[in-house]
Amino acid sequence: MKVEIVVKPELKDTHIVIYTNEITNEIQGIVDSLSNSQNRILTGIKDKKIFLLEDEEIYCFYSENQKVYAKTTKGKLWIKQKLYELENIYDGTSFIRISKSCIVNIDKIKNLDISYVGTIEIVFKNGEREYVSRRYISKIKKYLGI
């Protein structure tokens, strides 16, 4: 794949064109990623403060006591969106659902522990842990190419 960037100072808006002989999963992923990243501003609340969140500081989203939280480099933040809304917002990115109550950022995973019978334990770079539900094991294996 060749990537070319042309800077034209007279342009008012960014214009992206993809030339390809067919639409593959890779091309569709690029299009989805570009489309999703333009409108994705996520906020988290902690101690009466609102934080703007960037993808690279989010470890995972999870639900607890009917609320959704994000584990981030800034700590545990309350998120107003529901998990299914976050799943749609982050579709085609490095975020993947691993259970009914958790979506993880694959880029923040240190390693996967498959020693448990039938489950996978995810260990994040910060030492936190989450478990992949049996129902989602095939999805995460497919995503990781295992």
Image (cartoon, helix red, strand yellow):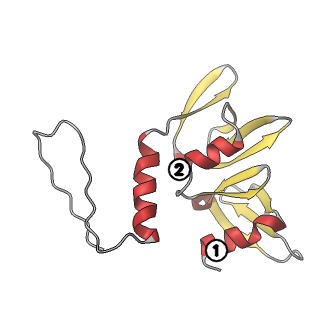
Question: What residue is disc 1 on?
Answer: 142
In the drawing, does residue 1 fall left or right of residue 77? Answer: left
The extreme top residue here reads: 48
The extreme bottom residue here reads: 146
Is residue 144 visible to the viewer in this orientation of the structure?
yes
Where residue 83 appears, as percent x and y from the top left, is 70, 43
In the drawing, does residue 59 fall left or right of residue 91? Answer: right
Where residue 66 appears, as percent x and y from the top left, is 83, 35
Mark 1: which amino acid? Lys
Question: What residue is disc 2 on?
Answer: 56
Name the mark nearer the viewer: 2 or 1: 1
Does dot 2 land on a helix, a strand or a loop? helix
Instruction: Check the image and report above or below for 50 versus 42.
Output: above
Instruction: Check the image and report above or below for 74 versus 141.
Output: above
Residue at point 21% right, 63% down?
A: 4
Residue 29, numbered label: none
